[in-house]
Structures are given as structure tokens and as C-alpha cells.
Image: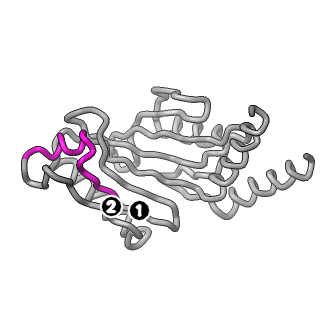
Amino acid sequence: MKKTKLILVLLILFSNLLFGQTIDGITLGKTEKEVISKLISKGFKLINTPTKTNKRYKGKLSNEDDVEISILSTPKTKLVWKLIIETYAYNWPSAKATFDNYKAKLVNKYGDSTINNNYFTTPYYEGDGYEMLALYKGNCTWSSSWYSPLISIQIRSYEYGKAEIWISYQNEKASEINNTEKAEIDNKTF
């Protein structure tokens, strides 16, 4: 048990020193407390705590975009392993323009995306005037992903007439710690 804790501490230090990704001054792989402090100093306000390891904040990025940010933390060591930035659009041209704008910035910083999926499925197609309905019904896939670092951007919808432009950043080392901690909890539970 002591050996496991030592390895975990070393992994934490290693991930913080070498594998931290920084998004608008917020570094993944840091403790939840550090990340929350940074969000609050930037003017973000807590709006929701869906789970003990997921907290949602609302505020403005440095470029003045109004967004919501979710931080996901490991259950034991409280390292932030994932950060999700969300903004909203209420029509397809606006959703697509926002997606294209953010994707261009990601391509500029990280290079070409590894995977791109941009399509509608029957009976919908781009330009039919029903793009938002297609999105809501799951007949529209609009996403791009990078494998190194682990980033994805997509347009999705859980409410008719409201598109979410969702950018997810994931720290690989902190994600591994999250999986290990969840497995330990599950092993004790079951």
C-alpha cells in the first residue's frame, strides 16, 4: 500500500511538472484547489456541482468570450484531469461559425486535427433549414479531435434550438490517475 501511494505521489509530481496543459492560464494536472483559485481570480463564478468531481463555472475567457467551464477532478487526489469549455448558439450558421473560429485557433496552436467528422444523416442535410433539429435528434455529427494533446471540439445539442460548442481538453497522465483511483474505489465497493 505504501509503495502504491509513493508511486501515485510521483505520478502526480511528474504530471504536474511535465504534462500540464494550459488553457487561458488554467493548467490541467494541477489540484482542483489551484484550478478553482485561478478561475475565481479570472472572475468565474460557480454555477453548478453535478458531482463531487465535476464543478461548473461561468465567466469570460481572456478574449472576452462568455463561456461555461467544467472541471473534472480525480476522486482521491483531486487533480484536474479534464477541462471543458462550452459556449452556445441558437441557429446553425452561428453554431458552425463559432465552431470554425475555435477550430481554426486550435489548428493554429496544435496543428491539423487527427479526426474530422462533419456530416448530417438522412433525411437532413446542411442547407435544408432543419440543421438545429438534426443536431437535436442526433442526425448531425460535427466534431474534430487531436490525439496529442487530447483535445476535441464538437457541436452538440441537448435542448432543441440550442447548440453547444464544446471544447474538451484532457491531461493524459492525470486521466490515468483518475482511472486508477476510480478502479481502487470500485474494488473496495464491490
The quadrant of the rendering that contains the C terminus is top right
Relative to the observer, which residue lies in front, 140 or 45?
140
Image x and y of residue 107, in percent: 37, 68
User: Residue drawn at (76%, 57%), measured in percent from left and top?
Assistant: 11
- Tell me which residue sits at (52%, 27%) in the image: 49
Q: Residues within 10 Å of mark 1 (few under 14, many from 20)?
A: many
User: Do the CB atoms of the residues marked 1 and 2 lie less than 8 Å apart?
Assistant: no
Of all residues, the one furthest to the right in this rendering is: 2
Number of residues whose C-alpha sits closer than 10 Å to that of mark 2, classed few (under 14), some (14–19) or many (20 or more): many
In the rendered image, residue 109, in percent from the top left (x then y), is placed at 42, 68
Q: Position of residue 139 (x, y in %)?
A: 23, 48
Q: Is residue 52 above or below residue 153?
A: above
Disc 2 target residue? 103
Answer left or right for 143 relative to 94: right
Inspect the image, locate mark 1, and give the three-letter code of the amino acid beneath it.
Answer: Ser
Q: Is residue 116 above or below residue 63?
A: below
Residue type highlighted by circle 2: Lys
| Residues in magenta, as a range | 129-143
Say if the magenta span includes residue 10.
Answer: no
Scheme of image coloration: one colour
Residue drawn at point x = 46 percent, y = 35 percent: 43
Q: How many marks?
A: 2
179 left or right, relative to 59:
right
- Magenta span contains residue 130: yes
